[in-house]
């Protein structure tokens, strides 16, 4: 059913800025947009604190094996049939999944489930965890095509903050901050979509 957004309020909402990974290496535009949005949410009555989940770093270490193995398991046969149709750098990344063993994959998932428990415990007292949607603004397209090292660094940064929700199994929503190409992302517990939609409806009104 559609979420009931009537009477949604931001005042009194408890929000946690995720200092682990999410606030690192921010470019000027995304940082300015996020900080301005946080200030406006606080002015509207949100209670905003900072927090960290140190084991989240280990989840990012596990992501390479988990994501590539999943990708290769789902699409490997199709990719092998016509590898030239895929951008080479992405092809190489997914191809690495063919070398992930079943025991590596299962051990990684076992460890990731524990990290998810750590994250849930650290964030349980908050209505949402917030962070910049992306630490970078859109990169230069011509340089992305011509410079492999630049593509790798910018691509991984562009994917990094949204990966928190992917790895932790969360629901998430992004709102514009008013700064071009700079969003603020709200992450909430699994299954919390209706509550998150209500929260973000009120937050969007405060940020308008």
Image: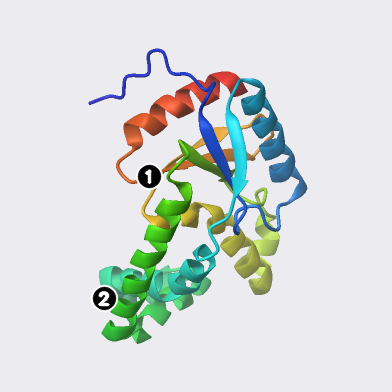
**Crowd rating for badge 2 (residues with CA inside 10 Å; few <14, some 14–19, many 20+):** few
Q: Quick check: 9 above or below 91?
A: above
The circle drawn on residue 77 is: 2
Q: Earlier in the sequence, mark 1 or mark 2?
A: 2
Secondary structure at numbered mark 1: loop
Is 29 on the left-hand or right-hand side of 127? right
Q: Residue 172 is drawn in which quadrant? A: top left
User: Percent from the top left, x then y, of residue 74?
Assistant: 27, 68
Instruction: Give the residue at mark 1.
Output: 189
User: Percent from the top left, x then y, of residue 192?
Assistant: 33, 38
Q: Quick check: 97 above or below 201?
A: below
User: How far is disc 1 from disc 2 in space, using C-alphas?
Assistant: 35 Å
Secondary structure at numbered mark 2: helix
User: Percent from the top left, x then y, of residue 51?
Assistant: 59, 50
Query: In the orientation shown, which residue stands out farthest toward the right?
Result: 28
Q: Is residue 17 visible?
A: yes
Query: Residue drawn at (32%, 79%), measured in percent from left and top?
Result: 107
Q: Is residue 165 visible?
A: no
Q: Residue 50 is drawn in which quadrant? A: top right
Query: Residue drawn at (60%, 22%), measured in percent from left and top?
Result: 45
> Which quadrant holds the C terminus?
top right
Is 15 on the left-hand or right-hand side of 127? right
């Amino acid at each position: 059913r559609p979420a009931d957004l009537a009477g949604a309020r931001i005042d009194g909402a408890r929000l946690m800025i995720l200092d682990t990974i999410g606030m690192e290496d921010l470019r000027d535009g995304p940082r300015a947009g996020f900080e301005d949005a946080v200030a406006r949410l606080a002015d509207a009555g949100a209670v905003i604190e900072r927090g960290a989940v140190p084991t989240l770093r280990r989840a990012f270490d596990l992501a390479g094996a988990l994501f590539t193995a999943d990708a290769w398991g789902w699409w490997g046969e199709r990719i092998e049939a016509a590898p030239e149709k895929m951008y080479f750098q992405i092809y190489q990344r997914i191809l690495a999944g063919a070398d992930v063993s079943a025991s590596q994959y299962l051990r990684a998932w076992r460890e990731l489930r524990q990290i998810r428990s750590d994250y849930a415990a650290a964030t349980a007292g908050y209505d949402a965890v917030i962070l910049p949607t992306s630490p970078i603004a859109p990169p230069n397209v011509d340089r992305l095509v011509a410079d492999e090292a630049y593509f790798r660094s910018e691509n991984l940064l562009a994917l990094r903050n949204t990966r928190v929700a992917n790895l932790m199994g969360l629901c998430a929503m992004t709102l514009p901050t008013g700064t071009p190409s700079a969003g603020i992302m709200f992450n909430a517990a699994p299954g919390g979509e209706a509550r998150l939609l209500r929260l973000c409806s009120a937050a969007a009104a405060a940020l308008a």
